Image: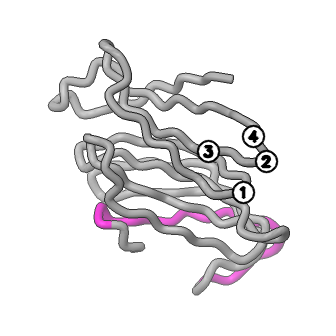
Amino acid sequence: MFYEIPLITDRSYELKIVSILVISLLLVSTFSLLAPRVHAQGIQWIRQFGTSHFDTSCGVSAHTSGVYVAGDTIATETSVLMFVAKYDIEGNKMWENQFGSGSLDACHGISVDDSGVYVAGSVAAALPGAKSSGFDDAYVRKYDFDGHEI
């Protein structure tokens, strides 16, 4: 299946169309994530990444500081980790962070503005340094443009 999701980008890069192409392929229970850069003339770059487990993307967001993608990956039979990664405008990976509560967690979205990177989702237990309010709490996590949690 192919899905195209338009993104908002900074016009200084003269991008006419920027989108993410999510391709779902089931090959020996392995899913991979794609983070492409698209111009009206065609795809400029595409990055495929993942683990030997089930990996999904929950969103992508573009900013003058780079392109950010977030998602989740199965760590164990009872644990899902979330991740957030930054790519520069040319498609080079700048950093990646993984986090989770050690339970069945989920990433639901990512957004970037001039103050930082925001990742949101749900967790089935407390994240490190946080207190659980009950089953499946919501979370929002903020990063600076260098990948440090704020």
Q: Disc number at residue 44?
A: none
Other residues around mark 2 within 10 Å, as few (<14) / some (14–19) / many (≥20)? few
- Secondary element at tag 3: loop
Q: Going from the N terminus, do you reach mark 4 or mark 1 first?
A: 4
| Mark 3 → mark 2, Cα distance in angstroms | 10 Å
Q: Which residue is mark 3?
A: 32
Does 47 sit left or right of 140 as displayed?
left
The quadrant of the picture occupied by the C terminus is: bottom left
- Pick the residue in front: 19 or 117: 19
Q: Which mark is residue 27?
A: 4
**How far apart in space, not on screen, are marks 4 and 3 (Cα)?**
10 Å
Three-letter code, disc 3: Ser
Q: Are marks 4 and 2 in contact (CB under 8 Å)?
A: yes
Q: Which residues are magenta?
A: 130-146
The answer to which of marks 1 and 2 sits earlier in the sequence is 2
Residue position for label 2: 29
Q: Secondary structure at mark 1?
A: loop
Which numbered disc flags the more N-terminal residue, 4 or 3? 4
Disc 4 and disc 2: Cα gap in Å? 5 Å
